[in-house]
């Protein structure tokens, strides 16, 4: 038997005996890190999904309110000019300029100032007549005047609401 080899094998065995549990500790640390990364990614994904849902809901009510305002503008375009000249018109959706439609809560009051849109049951529109636009006719010979209107669209759903205002001018 070789005495040098025996001493070497004793030193090697003693060195390995101190490292027997280190792989378990390394594996547990890696497992904890991977678990924390998984939980973090799950939470980030959940927040991103809620943000996307809110954005979808906002866009939906925004486009519904815009569609209601466009519906009001189309009604102005199709209306007889004689009905548009007076503030005491038979058109239930047309009001004089004293009607305050800037207040978003007023738009929901369908009995007095707004009309339900054809697009959705929670979507309304209304129009105010601002009258003759100042400086609209510089010609003495023309009898037509430039009239100004404001069209309002409002939509409200469970998780959002939007209020759109658009201007319209028509010469007659």
Image (tube, helix red, strand yellow):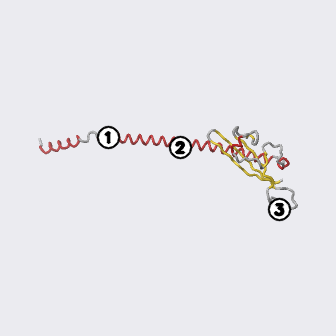
For marks 1 and 2, the one nearer the N-term is: 1
Q: Secondary structure at mark 1?
A: helix
Q: Residue furthest right?
A: 141
Cα distance between the residues tagged 1 and 2 = 35 Å
Q: Nearer the viewer, residue 32 or 92?
A: 92
Image coordinates for residue 52, horizontal then vertical, percent: 57, 43
Residue at the disc numbered 3: 138
Considering only order in the chain, which callout, 1 or 3, is on the residue closer to the N terminus?
1
- Residue hosting label 1: 25
Number of marks: 3
- How would you rate the neighbour count of disc 2 (Cα within 10 Å): few for under 14, some for 14-19, many for 20 or more? few
89 lies left or right of 67: right
Image quadrant in which the N terminus is located: top left
Tell me which numbered mark, 2 or 3, is placed earlier along the sequence: 2
Q: Is residue 167 left or right of residue 143?
A: left
Which residue is under mark 2? Answer: 48
Residue 110 has which mark?
A: none
Query: Marks 1 and 2: CB-CB under 8 Å?
Result: no
Percent of width and height locating residue 81? 84, 49
Residue 18 drawn at (x, y percent): 24, 41
- Discs 2/3, front: 3
Label 3 and label 1: CA atoms lie apart by 90 Å
Q: CA distance from mark 2 to mark 3?
A: 57 Å
Label 2: which secondary element: helix
Residue 172 falls left or right of residue 63:
right
Tell me the SS state at disc 3.
loop
The answer to the question of whether label 2 and label 3 lie on touching residues, with beta carbons closer than 8 A, is: no
């Amino acid at each position: 038997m070789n005495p040098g080899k025996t001493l070497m094998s004793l030193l090697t065995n003693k060195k390995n005996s101190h490292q027997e549990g280190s792989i378990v500790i390394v594996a547990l640390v890696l497992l904890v890190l991977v678990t924390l990364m998984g939980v973090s990614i799950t939470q980030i994904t959940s927040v991103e999904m809620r943000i996307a849902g809110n954005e979808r809901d906002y866009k939906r009510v925004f486009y519904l309110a815009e569609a209601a305002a466009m519906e009001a503008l189309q009604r102005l375009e199709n209306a007889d000019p004689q009905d548009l000249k007076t503030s005491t018109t038979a058109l239930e959706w047309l009001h004089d300029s004293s009607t305050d439609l800037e207040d978003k809560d007023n738009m929901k009051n369908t009995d007095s100032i707004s009309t339900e849109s054809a697009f959705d049951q929670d979507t309304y529109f209304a129009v105010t007549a601002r009258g003759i636009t100042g400086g609209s006719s510089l010609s003495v010979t023309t009898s037509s005047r430039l009239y100004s209107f404001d069209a309002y669209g409002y939509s409200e759903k469970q998780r959002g609401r939007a209020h759109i205002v658009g201007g319209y001018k028509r010469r007659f």
